[in-house]
Image (spheres, rainbow, N blue to C red):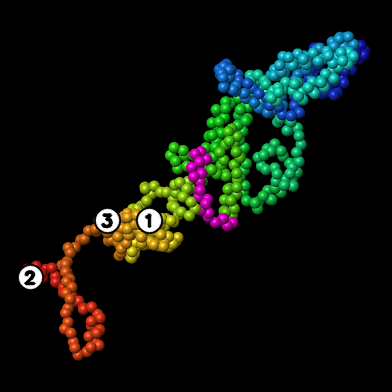
Amino acid sequence: MDADSDDPRQDELSSLQAIFPEIEPDDQRPFCFTIELPVHPAKPVTVAFPAASIAEDAAAQLPGVEPRVDSHELSHLPAVVVRMDLPKGYPSERPPSVSISTSPPWLTKDVTKKLEDDGARLWEEMGRDMVAFTYIDHIQQAADDVFGMVDGDGALVIDPSHKIAILDYDIEAARAAFEKETFDCGEFYNNAITEGDLATVRCLAPNCSKERAEAGRGKGKKRKVKTSISPSELLQMGLSQETVTRYVTLKYKNELESDKNTIYCPRSWCQGAARSKKHRKPEGLELVDESSDEDTEDEEGTNGKKKQAFDSGDLLAICEDCGFAFCSRCYQSWHGEFFRCAPKRDKGELSAEEQASIDYINLHTTPCPTCGVTAQKSHGCNHMICFRCASHFCYLCSAWLDPRNPYAHFNEQPNGKFTSCYMRLWELEGGDGDNVDHGFAGGARPAQNEAPGPVEIVHLVPEIEEPDDSDSDTEADDVAQPPPLRRAVLREKDRSSCG
């Protein structure tokens, strides 16, 4: 017992256990111990996992084909297990025996051999003295730069067979480091910590949650933050990139379909969603956080606040897939802000009365070529002026007319050509409507139920008056005025009887 107390190995081992409580001594060998040293680089290191399959290796050797490399930025690597044996005769005669291992074995054989040889080297440099603490400190400092294994491109290349284990270790180590830290509750100062962001943080103040609830009552109901697994975590779980891409696509599609205000492209071969501030298309494998601006506006509207006035420019929608610009009301190509349109309806949605009204409007009205407002002619010529935009146009063909000479459209053109409205200025003078559609656009004459009555034929016969010499003034007036016409009416049936 006294011999053991005088043994320098026992003194060094007791000192090491006081400095490093995590040291695990070997029950079978009293001067042998094991310690795990975490590898936490000073800066996050990019870990690259080259192609693992033979097919990918063969494809990488083809000209013009770059090898596929899967890289991740990690802050924690699996710990280095140091097993040190202090043999008899240490430290004056024999150096310590050191063995290095990792799980999984991500260290190369050369690095492992060098670290094991450093034990004897440091023992010689220190004059064959106690070297256990110095060696452990040497391993910890070497772990800051990952034992010099980072190449010139700043990447640490590791066998892809260890990918899942290394990524899992990084996640668990980051979580363990987070749980060891202490955070101050910010509810007393601001709302920086929102619900769902830090699920493991709980404030111990008794009135914290109560005061938070009272402060949030007057701000309206806010949407609860949705939590979902990120694509990078799915990749770390070992899922293929195609599977993760499909997950991101379906998640975005589900968000669009669950929103009743989503607008889709009218092109049958596209059917992509229009660009929106609420739902943004994922960029690669990264999900874009949803914006709650529109939800907040809707909530303010329901709480009684006045909404903003309608802006016709808001009808512009652009497909995020094909870039097609269209109107979100009529689903036609974008026509500008000053064109009035109507929502597109299926034929099955129209009643008989609505269809009859549409047919009547199409038959007996003409749209303005500038603003599209329809107009119906009640009487007069075919030179029309729009009541909204004051544009001059032709009622027959809806052509724009020059305000300086609108009637040139109905006459012979300077180049000798004729328009379709040549000499049709006074067509439909009595108006365009019921019972006159047969005079315009080839309409059929309405059917008559009763037989037509006798036709009256009016013959205008000039009445000759004898001159009167008694009054010269009256004679002068009679000469200045045209002779009156005497109307003779002869019915068709009387003529037939006379014949």
What residue is drawn where x is 82% and y is 15%? 119
The residue identified by callout 2 is: 498
Residue flagged by tag 2: what amino acid is it? Cys
Residue flagged by tag 1: what amino acid is it? Ala
Residue at disc 3, secondary structure: loop
Q: Position of residue 314 (x, y in %)?
A: 52, 50
What residue is drawn where x is 39% and y is 47%? 346
Q: Tell me if I can see residue 382 in this picture.
A: yes
Find the distance from the CA under tag 1 to the CA under tag 2: 54 Å
Residue at disc 2, secondary structure: helix
Q: Magenta stretch?
A: 305-325
Q: Main secondary structure of the magenta part?
A: loop
The residue identified by callout 3 is: 443
Name the foreground residue: 384 vs 162.
Answer: 384
Quarter holding the N terminus is top right
348 over 393 or under it: above or below: above
Q: Residue furthest front?
A: 415
The residue identified by callout 1 is: 399
Name the foreground residue: 302 vs 200.
Answer: 302
Residue flagged by tag 3: what amino acid is it? Gly
Q: Position of residue 234 (x, y in %)?
A: 60, 29
